[in-house]
Each structure stands twice: as C-alpha cells, then as structure tokens.
Amino acid sequence: MVYMLSSCDEGAVINPTTGKPEIIMFYNQTKGGVDTFDQMCSSMSCCRKSNRWPMTMFYGILNIAFINSYVIYTHNVLSKQEKPLNRREYMKRLSTELSKPSMRSRLEIPTLSRRLRENIENILPQTNQEASQETEEEPPAKVRRYYNLCTTKKKRMSKMTCTKCKKTVCGEHKKDVCNNCL
C-alpha cells in the first residue's frame, strides 16, 4: 500500500480504465524526469561513503548542483552552436576550477609539506609564473631608516617611504609624498 500526499488533488477521483487514483496516474506520467535525474546521479556521483548524515546530505546536494549546472552549461553551449564537453570532463573541470582558490591560498602556507606543494603546483602550473611575477613587482622589505630632513634633535627612524622618490619619511612630515617631491 502506498500513501500519497498531494495539494493538487481535489478528491479521490479514480480512473475507470485502470482503477488507479488520478494522482497516481499524474505521478506516473511526470516521474520520467525524476527517474532520469536519479539515473544521472547514480551513473556519475561525487558521493563518498559516510556514516554522518550531514555529509551524506551535502554530497547529495553537491550531486544535484553538478547535474543542474551541467544542464545549464549544455543549454548555453548548444545555443552558441558549439559542442559541449561530456559530463565527466565537465565535472573534472568544474571541480578543479572551484578548488583553485583554496589551492592557491594553501600554497602561501610556508610550512606546507613539500609533497603537497608539488602536487598542487602540478595541478596549477601557471601559479609558479604568477608567483614569480608578483615577487618581482613587490617593493623591497620595509626596513627602519633615519629620516634625513628632521633636525638632529628629532632624529627619527621610520619604515614609511615617499610614493614618488621612495626615500624614508617620518610620520610628522608624511603626506602622500615627501616635502621635497611637492
């Protein structure tokens, strides 16, 4: 015996040819999408075995999100009259793209193990080039130096520099640029 709860049924209307309630007939006509969706989830899933129900729910939601995004992706690509990726390749690319920011932030951890660092760099080969470009553009490390325009009585050390000439400036004389560059 199966119980069905529905808000669209106005009464217990039974189909005379099959002897089934109308709500069951409606469900049987429209369940094709649900079956297809379940089949897609079971054929290629990101689920892992877990005894914790929140993780099981999370993996289920992630599967739904993957399939929904793939449907939108194929619709957009086909509307441009291009050939879409197959679902496996799409899932690989999507998961890689979603995890790249996390991998980049982990590369900045100085105590990261060498093996893990190499694995991340293999996945993100362009990260090495970007990192070398960023280090070239970074200003030199700020060192405390004496400001040369203060009197000898007020000889001050500072880490601040003029944005134009890069000379050391004390806090009292600092504007956006030093007094000489004004």
Image (cartoon, grey):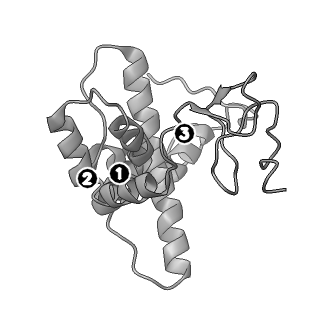
Q: Nearer the viewer, mark 3 or mark 2?
A: 2
Q: For mark 3, what is the residue?
A: 24
Q: Quadrant of the N terminus?
A: top left
Distance from label 3 to label 2 (Cα)?
50 Å
Q: CA distance from mark 2 to mark 1?
A: 9 Å
The single residue placed furthest to the front in the displayed view is 152
Q: Position of residue 82 (x, y in %)?
A: 45, 83
Crowding at dot 3, Cα within 10 Å, few <14 / some 14-19 / many 20+, comes out as some
Q: CA distance from mark 1 to mark 3?
A: 43 Å
Circle 3 sits in a helix, a strand or a loop, which is it? helix
Relative to 41, 22 lies left or right: right
State the residue at coordinates (63%, 51%).
Answer: 166
Mark 3 / mark 2, whichever is N-terminal: 3
- Amino acid found under the numbered disc labelled 3: Ile
Mark 2 crowd level (few <14, some 14–19, many ≥20, 10 Å Cα): few
Q: What mark, if any, has residue 114 been given in the picture? A: none
Left or right placement of residue 163 versus residue 87 in this view? right
Residue identified by numbered label 2: 123
Q: Quadrant of the C terminus?
A: bottom right
Q: Is residue 101 left or right of residue 42?
A: right
Q: How many marks?
A: 3
Q: Residue at x 29, y 14 (%)?
A: 51
The answer to whether 63 is drawn above or below residue 79 in the figure is above
SS of the residue under disc 2: helix
Q: At label 2, which amino acid type do we have? A: Ile
Q: Position of residue 20 (x, y in %)?
A: 53, 38
Residue that mark 1 sits on: 96
